[in-house]
Image (spheres, helix red, strand yellow):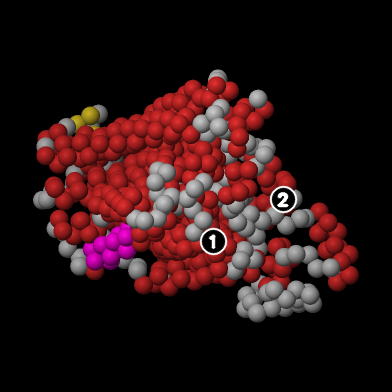
Amino acid sequence: MHEPLLVLGSIGLVCAVTIIISVHGLHRSRTTRDFYVASRRVPPWMNASAVAGEYLSAASFLGVAGLIMAYGTHGLWFPVGYTAGFLSLLVFVAAPLRRSGAYTIPDLMSLRFPSKLLRRLTAMIVVFTGWLYIVPQLHGAAIALSSTTGLPAWLGPAIVILVVLPTVVSGGMRSVTLAQAVQYWFKLSALLIPTVFIVLRLGVGDTNFIPDLANAFEVELVNDTQTSTYRTVSLVAALMLGTLGLSHVLVRFYTNPDGGTARRTTVLLLWLLAGFYTLPIILGVVARAVLPELGESASTDTALLQLPTALFDGLTGDLLTALVAGGAFAAFLSTASGLVVSISGVVSQEFFGGTVRGFRVGAILAMVLPIVATFVTTGLALAGAVAMVFTFTASSLAPVVLLAIWWRGLTVTGAVSGMVTGGFMSLAALLAGHLLDDAGMSMAVLQYPALWTIPLVLVVTMLVSSLGSQRPPENTDEVLARLHLPESLKQGTHSS
Amino acid sequence: MTHRRHPDDGSGDDLPAPDDDFVLDLIREPAPPQDVPESIRAMRARRVQVRMPTGAPSVKEVLLNPSETSGSTQPSRSLLRKLMRAQLRLGVTLVSWFFGLVVVVNVAFGFSPNLASLAVANVPLEWFIPAAAFIPLLIALGWFYVRRATANEQMLEPRPNQEVRQ
C-alpha cells in the first residue's frame, strides 16, 4: 500500500484550491456588466482550456488507460471518438450556437420553435443526461480513493459532493472560466509529469528492468472480428455525435465574442485534447506491459494509480501516485460541478421559474439521484459508462439539434417524435444489452446501438416533419439567418 | 451552522438545507439596509450578485436587436440558403470523410490480421493508426474547416448592397 497521507494531502489540496478559486471568482466578477463585457473579452485559448477543463472527466483521466488495459485496441478508439466529437461540434454547432445567443440546448430549441412541450422535453433530456454523466464521476472518486489509500470507497463520492454542492449552491463555479481553464492545465500536468518520469525510467533505466513492451500490443485473439469491427465503428459514431448534446460543454461557447472566435476556440480545443489524450494512451500501453495481471481483474480503471509504485520505489512512487490521484480528483470535481450547474440551471428555469431556490433544489437533486445510481451500478468501467451517456445523447438530442440548425423544414412534431424515438430506443437497447450479458453480434448491436439509432432518428424526424400536417414556424428563415450569417456582415449591412 | 434568517426573506423558509445562511449571504437579494450590520453592508456595497441569465433571449429580442442586425437590410433569402448549403456541404463532407476512414480502417484490420499487426517503429499498425494518425487528422480537418467556412462567409461580404432585396 502506498503512503495514504500523501494521497490524502494531494486530494485535500485540490479540493481547497477548487473552493478558493470559486470563492475568488465571486469577487472577480463583481457586476452583471463585468460578467457580460469581460466574458466577451476572454481569448480563445483561455476558452479552449476552460472547455477542456470541463470536458476531461473521470472517463478521460482514468478510464481511457483502463480501457486500453482491458480491451487493447478497442480502448484506443475512445480518445479518438472523444476528440472527434469536437470536430462535429466545430462544423455543425459552434458558430451557429454562438450566433444564436442561446446558452443551452433548451434555449436553442425555444428560439427555433415557440413550443413549451418541446422545450420541456429537451430540458428533461438534458437533466437526465447530466444525471447519467455524474454517476461515473462518483464511481471514479470511489475507485481512486479506495485503491490508493485503502479507505472505504464511499468516502470518495462523499468528498466530491461535499466540495461541489456548497460551491455550486453558494453561487461559485458559475461561469468561472479561469477556474476551469486552470483545471485543464492541472490535469495535464498531473499526467504529464508521471509520464515523463515513467518514459525516462523505461528508456534509460536499468536494462534488466525494462519490461517487454511487445507484450503490451498482444491482443487476446478476437474470435469474432465482425462484432469487434461493428462495436468500434458504432462507438466512434456515438462519441462523434454525443458531444453535441452535452449541455455543460455547450454553455461555455457563450463566452466567445462571436461565431468566428467560437470556431477558433474549437480548433485550439482539438489541440488541447490531442495533447492530453496522448498521455493516457502512452500510460495505458505501459500499464499493459508492467501490470499484466491487472488486465485480468475487473479494476483496470485503477491502472494509472498503480503504475507509479509499480515502477518506482519509495518516495518517488508515492509522490507520483499522489499527483495522479490529485489530478483525478480535479477531473471529478470540475466535471461534476459543471454538470451540477447545468442541471440546476435547467431545473430552476423549467420548474421553478428561474428562482434561486429552484437552483438550489436543482443542485441537490442533481447530486442525490446520481448517488443512488452510484450504489446500484458499481461494476461498470468508467469510460464504458460515459460511452453509454454519449450513445443516449447522440440518439436523442444530437440529430434534432443538427436538424434544428441546418434544416428549415423541421417542425415541432417532427422534433418531438425524433427525440422520443431516439431516447426510448437507445435506452431500451442499452438496458437490454446489459441485462442479457453475452458476447455475440446481437448483443453488440444492443450494447452499441448508435450506428442504427442515429439514422433511425434522423429518418423519423424528417419524415414526421415533411409528411405531418404541421408547418415549420413562420420566422424560420429569420432565425436561421441569425444563426448562420457572420456578425460582421450584419453590422456591415446595418451601417450601409 | 446557525439558522438566522432575514425577516423579510420568505422565499427560502421551507428549504431544509442546513447551510441556508451561507447561501443567503452570497446569492440572495440583499436584505434592507436597516437589518444589516455596518460591516456586512460595506461588503455588499462592493458586491453585486451575478447570475446566469435565467432565460434565453426571446425570439423577438434576438431578431430585432438593433445593435446587431436589422431586418430590412439582411441579405436575401436565396443568399442565406446558398451560404447554409455551402457550409452544410463542407461540414458533412469533412465529417463523413473522417467517419468513412474510421470504417475503412476498422474493416481492413478486421479482414486482414496481417495488416493489423504490421509494425511501424515496433508498434503494430492496429495500435499506431488510431493513436498517431487519427487524432492529428482531426486537428488538420478542424483547421481546414475554419479556413473554408470563413471563406464561404466572406464571399457574401464585399457586396452586401447588391444583395439587399426586399
**Rendering coords of residue A465 (x, y %):** 36, 52
Any part of residue A314 in sight:
no
The first of marks 1 and 2 along the sequence is: 2
Magenta region: A421-434
Residue drawn 67% across the image and 39% down it? B66
Quadrant assignment, res A173? bottom right
Quadrant assignment, res A205? top left
Instruction: Check disc 2 and give the amino acid type.
Output: Thr
Residue annotated with mark 2: A32
Any part of residue B104 in sight:
yes
In magenta stretch: residue A428: yes
Count residues near mark 1 (Cα–Cα under 10 Å), then give few for <14, some for 14-19, many for 20+: many
**Rendering coords of residue B91 (x, y %):** 38, 34
In magenta stretch: residue A441: no
**Rendering coords of residue A365 (x, y %):** 52, 70
Instruction: Check disc 1 and give the amino acid type.
Output: Val
Residue annotated with mark 1: A346
